Amino acid sequence: MEKLIEKLNGKIKSWTNSKLAPKEFLEEELRRIINQIILKEIKWINFEKVSAYFNDNFFRRYKEELEIDFVNYFDPKNSEIIDNPLRNWKPTYAGCNGQIEWFLRENGLEENIEKLVRGAEIEPSELPTRLKKYFIGIGYLYPTEDKLIVHPNLQLAQIIPYFYSMDSTFLTRDLIRCPYHESNYSNLTDKELWQYWTDLVALSMIGLIPHTLYLAEDFKTKENFDSFLEVGKKLTPNRYVKLEPKIEKFDWLLPEEFIKIEKYLEKIKRF
């Protein structure tokens, strides 16, 4: 493992020259992405050959995506401006889920989309309650004491809908169903709903078993998810779940952490 890490660190450093993002950001985030992929594919990865998977095409793709990511969160004035906020609205807001598309239409998406995309702050009373809750529950509206802040997650999803859509951090195909079920969040405050979403993000980072509904109440029984959340939160960039982004240090996950998740996945069925 040490030789593999040394080899991958060398590759990472060779891909950190950029006019759009600083070296320290690219280095730490490329390392994070590689750890995410190794963890999600742990059952199929041959560690003797894994470095071949992370080739030039891999680094080229993720470097370009991280450059867009950096501008969006750290230099938003220079981020791309969307002319038509309803362009590609289905993958951007509904994960191409037919039920959710109707839910959004019926609850005022089209009438409020300009307000959501163009604004910086929104009064909670300005949005239909169900639409407001939904947008908090997918990480696009950040709740404070008396305001809703349009999170940069929303802008990034607009810029790259094909990437940050059906199987992304924000609109993971299976996890998106959770905020849609009102009984799942009806008793949650806006801040509690945001925290629930950040837990879902952590689960999506480690490739949690899909095709099931993860309820807010599930997280109250911590032993169900402790092993997942501990690692998943390490893999979650601060800029996705907080309001103020910062460049973070990211160290390699230890083999013990990979093994712990692999065994846990084998053990459980429902969670």
Image (cartoon, rainbow, N blue to C red):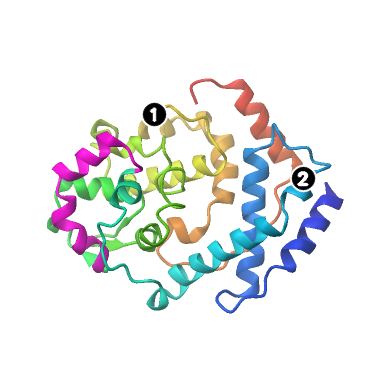
Task: Name the quadrant containing residue 118.
Answer: bottom left
Residue at 53 percent across and 57 percent down: it is 237
Residue to which mark 1 is pinned: 213
**Between 165 and 77, the one nearer to me in the picture:** 165
Residue at 29 percent across and 33 percent down: it is 184
Query: What kind of element bears circle 1?
Result: loop
Three-letter amino acid code at disc 2? Val
Stretch of the chain drawn in magenta: 95-119
Which x, y percent locates residue 261? 64, 34
Left or right, 1 with respect to 66, comes to: right
Task: Name the quadrant containing residue 148.
Answer: bottom left
Which x, y percent locates residue 45? 73, 37
First-in-chain label (1 vs 2): 2
Query: What kind of element bears circle 2?
Result: helix
**Between 18 and 73, the one nearer to me in the picture:** 18
- Report whether residue 250 is seen: no
Marks 1 and 2 close (CB-CB < 8 Å): no
- Report whether residue 86 is seen: yes
For label 1, the crowd category at 10 Å Cα-Cα, with few meaning under 14, some 14 to 19 and many 20 or more, is some
Left or right, 74 with respect to 83, comes to: right
- Is 151 above or below relative to 181? below
Three-letter amino acid code at disc 1? Leu
Residue to which mark 2 is pinned: 50
Which x, y percent locates residue 191? 31, 50
Q: Nearer the viewer, mark 1 or mark 2?
A: 2
Q: Is residue 140 magenta?
A: no
Q: Magenta residues: mostly which secondary structure?
A: helix
Residue at 39 percent across and 29 percent down: it is 213
Residue at 53 percent across and 52 percent down: it is 236
